[in-house]
Amino acid sequence: MRILKTLGLAALLAATSTLAQAQDLRVGLQEDPDVLDPDQSRTFVGRIVYASLCDKLVDITPDLEIIPMLASGWEWNAGGTELTMSLREGVTFHDGEPFNAQAVAANIDRSQNFELSRRKSEVKSITSTEVIDDYTIKFTLSAPDATLIAQFADRSGMMLSPKATAEAGEAFGLNPVCAGPFKFKERIQQDRIVLEKFEDYYRADEINFDSVTFLPIPDTTVRLANLRAGDLHMLERLAATDLSSAEADDGLNVEKATSLGYQGITINIANGAAAENPLGQNAAVRKALSLSIDRNALNQVVFEGAFAPGNQPYSPTSPWYNADFPVPERDVDAAKALLAEAGFADGVTLEIQVANNPVQTQVMQVIQAMAGEAGITVELAAKEFATLLADQSAGDYTASQIGWSGRVDPDGNIHQFMTTGGGINDSKYSDPDMDRFLNEARLSTDPAVRKQSYNAAIAKQQEDMPIVYLYHPVWIWALKSGVEGFTPYPDGMIRLHGVSVAE
Amino acid sequence: MLAFLARRIIIAIPTVILISIFVFSLQHLLPGDPILVMAGEERDPDVIAALREKYRFNDPIPMQYLAWAGNALQGDLGISLRTQQPVLELIGEKLPVTIQLAVMALIIAILIGIPAGVLSAYKKGTWIDWVANIIALSGLSVPNFWLGIMLILLVSVKLGWLPASGYMPLTEDPLQSIRVMIMPAFVLGTAIAATLMRHTRSAMLSVLKSDYVRTARAKGLKERVVLIKHALRNALVPVVTVITLLFGELLAGAVLTEQIFTIPGFGKLVVDAVFNRDYAVVQGIVLCTGIAFIFMNILADAAYRILNPRMSQ
């Protein structure tokens, strides 16, 4: 129903906003995106550009339902090992090449086999693709994989012109050719990315701008100053500390959505010799650390209450959140009791590494003070992010404050972190029950069945706590008043369908 | 003069080679693994292995250096690991931006620094001297980033006179280009102006005490002629040295200024490249900066000879 409303609103806006034609929309980004090749790129901010440049097989609604985009429909076979997709007809790429089943097959092949592809693990389960007819394609999987459709709602599902990828190879990102509402015009690294309206776009009536310019402005104060000065129409990731001032500004509107991601403390449990410490060896100490933290106070102090306190890989508003384990209240006495029970009545000392940016450092300083009151002395090691990541991956750490940008499918927020041998399981946590819950959750496409598995996995996670979850960031967009039709999505993207600017 | 220039350029070659070796080694001492950063959030082991192989990270560092140097000699500085753009193209894109910023900042610094220095030397011990000193000192002590943000808030947000940030190429719209760049150039220039003012002042003070200035005055020359033609011209020799040294400071200062005003120049490129461990870009930029610095020094030596022909003998 929500979808219909959104679409209806979009159509209405499209119909009424012909006055707002001949416009350039200027969007302030927090960072400069990396290479503009969906198979190669890795940054969150790059995906914001793709939302205007490259349409995907499927999209999501603000409620995370998966809806058709370039695919018009799909069905699974009974065993969940074959996915047949029907494709939208009459779609062309920016270079005029037709979009069809052959193009989809070529795209999957590139994601799987291109030397520099970062998408390999996302489409690993596909063993073969079969072009049934021009607008029908069948994927055969090695095993049931409920996560695949959600992958198609992101970079793995972005369709690139096969002619352009064949011609440009590695250099495709210098001049990307997709099938989105805007086509690539120019990029000056660290300055701007300019896209212009694609006249043959299949939903052209929903697009109200002749061009869109993305301007990376990393300093949040300067980004907001640009918006206020009228140099931008909108910006993404407003700092939580600027929220109240932006809300009080009559010239600005603010939109928010709780992100799919989280921030937490990853604990080294069995990743080399550095795991030999009270925190790594005792779940009770980890639970004590978690209990010593007042997550609401943390949110108030660092983020002026704008973010969402959390204790699971899913935010409390997510359908996958296990309500049996609500965000715990701070309980210093219980934390001390747990420590004493584990044999550390005199307290413990541990080092936590944190990225050396002001916000994350402040988060950890608040936690340091809170944990100290429960007898847990936290020493902070502030490291530049590349170093932090290398140390964490190599097992050269006790605990690490790090986050995850989040995925549409619940699997993406937990499987690789908690299963034995998981690609980013830097804790090296391993538990046969956890492996079973998380692997089973991949097998069924029935949300109710999957929910049971995830509930069990969360219960186990609360018991063993290889990651202490802290909070879920909230995406905050600030828009110049007059920018209308913008819908906030939990994936943090900016979808320009139906957006217009009233002069 | 030509022989002098040729000699200086030949001497500069080993320096350039040393710089490149030094930077190459230093970069590899940086903690953190560039491939982990590049592999993306998932850090897929297959992807990591493929990237390591592709970008020769499995080779020993001296081999990596030789491969890089071999390509560099043929004018190929590699590609940015982050955006796939050729480094040479990036440098060609960013160099004019930073040069424009640096030149505008230098002009502002000279326009403020030299007259202030002359004035405060001439009016030594009076209130004019004190005011000039206080302004110079505050120019030195106020941090770039603070002044930058304050100016943006005042001039762009409150008054709406100038754009808050961004860039416009000089060739596309010269007026807009200067409008966008004037605020950052001012921020960058004021810090340098202070140093320039102090040096001009002390050079002028010593020159004003010299015999020929007294002689010039005794001849009955106008005070303005004494000051500008006789005193300042001689006082400028050490000031030119300072200006060339300050050019290095300008490039360094540009790193911060470009971050604040989001100017897509050299400084911003190098900072982002270091954080992303984009080795080829860092290497290429440092090499170019080194060459630019050496070139500025050669120019300074040539300028001495023009200002003071006795130096060529």
Image (cartoon, coloured by chain):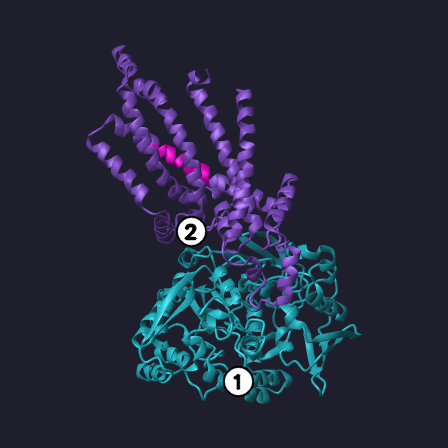
In the image, A316 versus A339, the foreground residue is: A339
Residue B106 lies within the magenta run: yes
Letter of the chain in purple: B
Label 1 marks a residue whose chain is A
Residue A457 disc label = 1
Q: Quadrant of the N terminus of chain A?
A: bottom right
Residue B85 lies within the magenta run: no
Considering the numbered disc 2 on the image, is that residue within a helix, a strand or a loop?
A: helix
Q: Position of residue A108 (x, y in %)?
A: 71, 69
- Say what amino acid the circle numbered 1 marks: Ala
Considering the numbered disc 1 on the image, is that residue within a helix, a strand or a loop?
A: helix
- Say what amino acid the circle numbered 2 marks: Ile
Which of the 4 image quadrants contains residue A311? bottom left
Crowding near the residue tagged with mark 2, few <14, some 14–19, many ≥20 C-alpha atoms within 10 Å = many
Q: Position of residue A22 (x, y in %)?
A: 57, 57
Can you tell which of label 1 and label 2 is closer to the viewer? Answer: 1
Q: Position of residue A141 (x, y in %)?
A: 71, 78
* Residue A212 seen in this snapshot: no
**Magenta-tinted stretch:** B102-113
